[in-house]
Amino acid sequence: MTLLLQFLINGLVTGALYALVALGFGIVYRSTKVFHLALGAIYTASAYGAYAVLKWGKGTGILIGILTALALGFLIERCVYRPFYKKDSSPGVVLVASLGLYIFIVNLIALIFGNEVKILSPGIEPSFSFFGIILTRMQIIQFFTGIFVIIIWLILLKKSRFFKAVWAMGDEPVLVRVLGLPLWRLRDTVFILSSFLVAVSSILVGMDVGIDPHIGLPAFLIGAVAVFVGGMNNFSGWVISAFIIAELQSLVIWKFSARWNDAITFVVLIAVLLLKPQGIFSVKGRMEER
């Protein structure tokens, strides 16, 4: 029983990090309809940005890592997605462009830093025991930082006029411009905030288990699955789904092996798409909205 509880607690920690990525992907996809696969590259780049200046201190590394992600998200929107949007390109074309960006950035990182694992936080982390459950200091930091950012994010989603405008942009982008709302500024801000969320997750993970150039895609895919499982119109559903996926993965590790993690994630996605394609936490709209 203690071992099961240990895995469940580990799942909560992992879920907080998955939820950040889900919120980052979801806010972009919900508001711009861009399947932002390049977000996986931003996830990777932020960790390597922190690693590049780690000799100047962890605080500086974290700051540079986050700034790297913000700058990359902004440039991708301005230089790639926006021209496609102005040309009214199909979602498929934008997806291919996003995939190309991911491949280019990840290979550039591998060329500069190499493919081997890099350690952001050398040394052995102190651990704490609570009723037989062992947690490292980094796990505690990961969980509470993730929960704090999630709470602030969800409060802003509910209370901020900006996020109401973002929601409207996802529903009727043409109407946003008709109403005189700053469409380009909204898009810039969405991509920057999305990059911030994945940067926090990436750096926290990197400081725990290290980084390599290929960490971004698995994290991105889990975040995307959490959004589709939770339901496109339910921000809270994305978070809950991220925790559910993390707990299921922990149970799979407990019973079988970590090699089955990806399998259980996509089994959940396929099951939801077959049984409830709108998402398990989807919110029904009014008849006049359909």
Image (cartoon, rainbow, N blue to C red):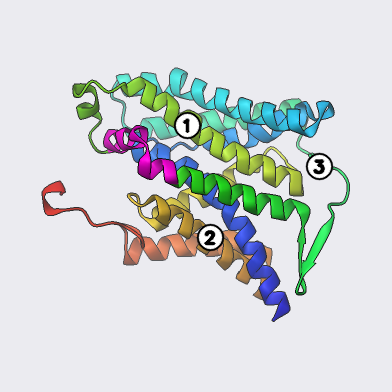
In the image, 255: left or right of 75? right
Q: Quadrant of residue 173?
A: top left
> How would you classify the magenta stretch by its main secondary structure?
helix
Q: Which residue is mark 1?
A: 98
Q: Earlier in the sequence, mark 2 or mark 1?
A: 1
Residue under the image location 71 percent in, 55 percent down: 139
Instruction: Give yes or no for residue 219 being in the magenta stretch.
Output: no
Please state the extent of the stretch shown in magenta in the rendering. Answer: 155-170
Dot 3: what SS? loop
Residue 78: image quadrant is top left
Q: Position of residue 80 (x, y in %)?
A: 44, 21
State the image quarter where residue 88 is shown: top left
Q: Secondary structure at mark 2?
A: helix
Q: Amino acid at mark 2?
A: Phe
Report the front residue among 90 and 119: 119
Q: Which of the image's four quarters has the N terminus?
A: bottom right
The residue positioned farthest toward the right in the image shown? 123
**Relative to residue 179, is residue 135 drawn left or right?**
right
**Residue bearing mark 2:** 243
Q: Relative to residue 24, is residue 181 depicted above or below? A: above
